[in-house]
Amino acid sequence: MTDRPTSPASAAPEEESRLTVVLLAAAAIAWTAAMLWSARTTITGRVSAEMEVTSTAYALPGAVAADLVAGAAVALLVLTLIGARRTLGPSARFAVATGAGLLTGLLSAIPVVTINTAGSLYAIVGGTVAAAATIGGALAGFRIPRVIAAAAFASIGVFVLGFVLNLFQAPVLDLLGAGDTASTANAAQWFSYGQAALSGLAAGLIAFFLLRRAEGAVKWPFYALAGAGAGLVTVIGEILSRTAGSKVLELAGKVSELDKLAQQILSTARLNSGLIVLFVGAMTAMLAVGRTMSPATDEDDDEEDEGQTSSSNSETAYHSNS
């Protein structure tokens, strides 16, 4: 198959436009600020230490995912601004991107750490958030800025879609047959699967439309990577929450057996949803870009045959003259 756009793809993809990166950074910072403000408000509103711990555990994965995207977005913005003046080598680009992500993470950790400086709980949360932003910045250091930007926009789109769908969760659960405890759990599971599938579809389409603007500057496998980006953000965020933030989840599990079970169920559900978004997003982007590609025409085959015949005739003439 041959791609319709005729412009050749360069070895290193072009930088994303400044306007796009500015909008991405603004949206990512707004998302992160909203998650951190919500987490801080919820945690400080609890009357007991046990409720603070459980609220912190519930808020951690969302804050980590948002900071991961924010770190990448801010790093892309810094790289774009610097790139307008000078060209950075691979090492310098990676160092600048990682530093921008680290700075974003440190600023994001302040609202969390200052909730209570007496114990280590919020220091762990702040460190996890900072680590997520640093990882996001480091990922932005790869020389695929358009792909990183598309994946980040897709992640924000998935968050917005999830927020909207959750507003209609109650009536949808009723339609799915929620009633007693067992039927409600089953309906909630189907709702989660449906939301993940729709989120993956949205992520793939967002990534496709953003990358398609490059008109051939991005190779087709990167469409799948960008489409899977939103799912990767969820999966990486869950892994960070389970590792760097494991102490928080462990303390929340000690509050009661019910809280421990709830944490395990939610953690598994987030990971499964992330994997669904990853797969559906990648497939959607691949199918979308595949529809814009056309098979080789008969004229292309004839030209290739003529080229091979001409080459054979040249070799025959050369050997005859020899």
Image (cartoon, helix red, strand yellow):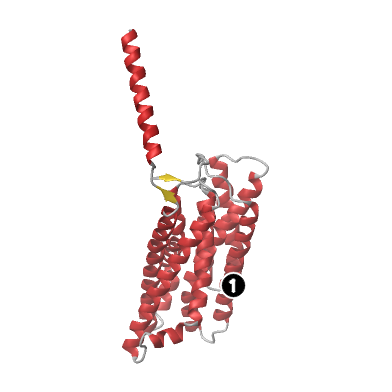
Q: Is 181 or 212 nearer to us in this picture? A: 212
Q: How far across and how far down the image is residue 39, in percent?
A: 55, 76
Reply above or below: 78 against 318.
Answer: below
Q: Is 203 on the left-hand or right-hand side of 25?
A: left
Whether residue 42 appears in this view of the structure is yes
Q: Is 58 or 52 nearer to us in this picture? A: 58
Q: Quadrant of the C terminus?
A: top left
Mark 1 surroundings: few (<14), some (14-19) or many (≥20) residues within 10 A? some
Q: Is 211 or 42 nearer to us in this picture? A: 211
Q: Is 85 on the left-hand or right-hand side of 50?
A: right
Q: Residue at x 37, y 73 (%)?
A: 193
Residue holding disc 1: 34
Q: How far across and how far down the image is residue 283, in percent?
A: 39, 59
Q: How far across and how far down the image is residue 164, in percent?
A: 52, 77
| Residue 262 sits in quarter | bottom left
Reply above or below: 90 against 43.
Answer: above
Q: Secondary structure at mark 1?
A: helix
| Residue 258 sits in quarter | bottom left
Q: Amino acid at mark 1?
A: Ala
